[in-house]
Amino acid sequence: MNTNFNFNFSRFLKVLRNEWRLNLKKMVLFWGGMIIITVLYFAVNRIDGHSIDKTLTFGLSFFMMCIMQGFYLQNYYHEFSSKTKTQALLLLPASRNETFWAKFILGFLLYFVLFSAYLFLVIKCAGIYNDWIKEIANWSLDSWWYNNFERYQTLAIDLQTGFICFFVWLFSASAYLFGILSFKKLAVLKSLVFWFGVVMGLLLLTCVVYALFTGVWPHAIPGIMIAAKTATGDNYCAIIQMYPELLYGLGIFICLALIAISRVKYNEKTI
């Protein structure tokens, strides 16, 4: 029954419902914890009586949720933490395909939907909070907070920025999935260390290749942007601006490859 590629949609739905039932309480506790942290963040700002920087709030929330993705995924693939749990998984009347994709939908895709809704609500509440603070703070016309209110209240996310955010999340999620199915103990922590080393290594390699071809050592900017001074020394050219389709395409390919490799490792874990 528990073969590699056997897939029955009716049985898959039963596995999905079972996963949902088993993890609903943990899911509610997780997102409840995120809401409590957010409320505390607003409360601290209220004590100071200052506006909330929407851009900073978005960045902090996005970074936190990308990090927490690993712990969220680990909850769904926790069976491999011991032989007993792995054996219990093998006894389920479902194929590896059905169990893997049921966990993937709830731990990967559903997380993205809830993650997006969480970010939207946080930014919306930040805007409401700022308007409320402005009404009751009685700032003078020449005060710093009054003059900088619009900057704090504005969050500009264009299509490119939105796609970069999506790519960062997709890479973090697929990298965590790969790490959870590759490492036995402390999988999330080991994944963070491993992929930090890989990204830094690729960044250094890109700098070396760029220097070999152009004779100019680039300035490495965190993320996927590599910038180098032009001949005048005043301007910068960035690879992400010169070849965006190449970087985006390569990034998406790497993420999909990690998911595919994770699927294979899931089979190896259950052999």
Image: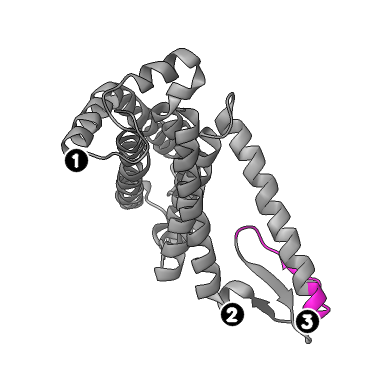
Question: Magenta span covers which residues?
Answer: 211-223
Q: Residue furthest bottom?
A: 232
Rendering coords of residue 266 (x, y %): 46, 35
Q: Is residue 203 above or below residue 68?
A: below
Q: Amino acid at mark 1?
A: Phe
Per the rendering, the mark at residue 233 is 3
Q: Residues within 10 Å of mark 1 (few under 14, many from 20)?
A: few
Dots 2, 1 in contact, CB < 8 A = no
Please state which amino acid type lies under the numbered disc 2. Met
Q: Is residue 97 above or below residue 259?
A: above
**Disc 3 secondary structure class:** loop
Residue at image position (52%, 33%) is 180
Tag 3 near tag 2, CB within 8 Å: no
- First in residue order: circle 3 vs circle 2: 3
Cα distance in 3D space between marks 3 and 2: 18 Å
Q: Earlier in the sequence, mark 3 or mark 1?
A: 1
Residue at point 53% right, 57% down? 254
Q: Which residue lies at the image location 19% right of the left edge and 30% below the top edge?
A: 14
In magenta segment, residue 214: yes
Residue 46 appearing in the image: yes
Q: Which mark is residue 177?
A: none
Q: Is residue 262 above or below residue 166?
A: above
- Closer to us: mark 3 or mark 2? 2
Q: CA distance from mark 3 to mark 1?
A: 60 Å
Q: Amino acid at mark 3?
A: Gly
Q: CA–CA distance between discs 2 and 1?
A: 45 Å
**Mark 1 highlights which residue?**
9
> Where residue 245 appears, x then y in whole percent?
50, 74
Q: Which residue is mark 2?
A: 242
Instruction: Specify the quadrant that holds the N terminus.
Output: top left
Disc 3 packing (10 Å; few <14; some 14–19; many ≥20): few
